[in-house]
Image (spheres, coloured by chain):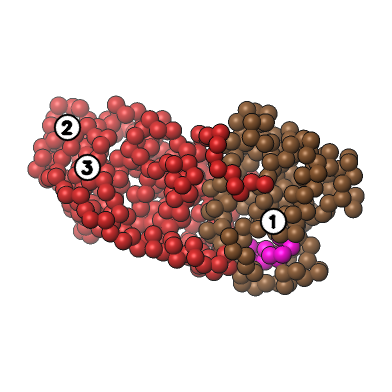
Chain colours: A red, B brown
Amino acid sequence: MKDLQDLAQRLLVDGTVAVVIGYERGPRGARPAFVQRPEDVERLIFDAECVQNLATYLSPRRRHLLKLGRKAVVAKPCDVRAIAGLVREKQVKRDEVVVIGVRCPGVGEDRCVTCTAREPRLADHLVGAAVAAPAAGESQRDAKLRELEAMTPAERWNFWQAELSRCVRCHACREICPMCQCDRCVASKTQPQWIESSPHARGNLSWQLTRVLHQAGRCVDCGECERACPEGIPLGLLLRKVAEVVDRRFDFRPSDDPELPTPIGAYRLDDPQEFIL
Amino acid sequence: MSKSTQPSTPSSAPGDVAFEPRLTAFVCNWCTYTGADLAGTSRLQMAANVRIIRLPCTGRIDPLFVVKAFERGADGVIVSGCHPADCHYTAGNYHARRRFAVLQELLTFLGVEPERLTFSWVSASEGAKWADVVNGATERVRAVGPFAAYRALVADALPADELQPAARGGAPRATTATEERA
């Protein structure tokens, strides 16, 4: 933690960045912190409670944050994939942001069980003690995925209707997502209204379907949408399903390499088309 | 992919003689629309259950179009365009192929019967293939029954008969040029 604070102080004092976006201790676990003064760097922490993906604060959609000036951001290996995604989609210039990579022991999420990345690669600085590669565990989410796939369509329909009918259309999943970056979301447009905006089952289905499709090949599996959802809808399941499809069909996994093309938007002449007559 | 009956609130049994499936077809202007035209001018007999919506290219078809068709009362959807390497815009169908691959797997995962979605490549010379696609899709949708589950998503949803474009205001405009004289 000392090396993180020292690095943040150095970056702020020599004027490399105007703000360091990191984590601080809040009343209920770790929370995002925006440190602009060198004397405040003692607030910065990193531990297994730091679950948030701070890359979302780099999105140019957040215009009020653009005004803060040059940023350094504390990023776990999974968060770095979101930064790579933003660079890949020309939303952020790589040399405009200082990435403080942290070696991550896992932050207690289900996705951490199967995660093998412990050291971010796309980083300007690397802090934290070395962490041993974990033993591969059983992901509850993947188990649930297999369970759903074994159901009949009618059973799956009823499962998802039970989940999606709780959606209150607060759009927290969109707001927190580091990869949701449209100036005007299709769900907010009213003329024509493609997605019904009131919280009922039909509009909810249309909204989540659209959001998940827009994340195909782009979702970095940071789990923020599911964490932000006030109704506890298992959005990660849908995204995981699409990620598996994209992996199987297009051989693409969330990557910290900003040079890779996104799978939707690219194509191969021999893409599988067994579903087309 | 497993067959199944409709989930909650089936309004009529699958295979019910009274049930005429309603299908929406999103087709590209250059190949499938012309192919459908050929089927019509060749006087091929085919199911009259399909409403065609013509678009410039399969690459223009947003997955939301398919969702909207279901919302507006379609029991099934056909998406059809130029064969690979035949796209008028060089690569629109390749992009579409990737999107629809994800779309159909996601819809299946959400519990939509795969029989409700048909994707095909139909060239301008394949009028007979278009007739086969239309007949096949209609029969598959007829077998799984009306998409009552989707219509039941809104408590105050209109019954299927009132989902005609006139009753719903700005409903998608259906092209009837190739609707059959059957």
Labels 3 and 2 within one chain:
yes
Does any portion of residue A40 appear in the rendered image?
Answer: no
Residue at screen point 53% across, 53% down: B106
- Residue A217 screen position, x and y as percent: 45, 43
Q: Which residue is mark 3?
A: A119
Q: CA distance from mark 1 to mark 3?
A: 48 Å
Q: In the image shown, does B51 or A51 lie closer to the viewer?
A: B51
Q: Disc 1 residue type?
A: Gly
Q: In the image shown, does B56 or B32 lie closer to the viewer?
A: B32
Labels 2 and 1 within one chain:
no
- Residue A87 screen position, x and y as percent: 37, 32
Asked whether residue B43 is drawn in magenta, I would say: no
Q: CA distance from mark 2 to mark 1?
A: 59 Å
The disc at residue A12 is 2
* Highlighted magenta segment, given as a residue range: B141-151
- Name the element at disc 1: strand
Q: Nearer the viewer, mark 3 or mark 2?
A: 3
Q: Earlier in the sequence, mark 3 or mark 2?
A: 2
Q: Which residue is mark 1?
A: B76
- Name the element at disc 2: helix
The answer to whether residue A87 is left or right of residue B35 is left
- Residue B81 screen position, x and y as percent: 69, 39
Dominant secondary structure of the magenta stretch?
A: helix
Q: In the image shown, does A95 or B110 lie closer to the viewer?
A: B110
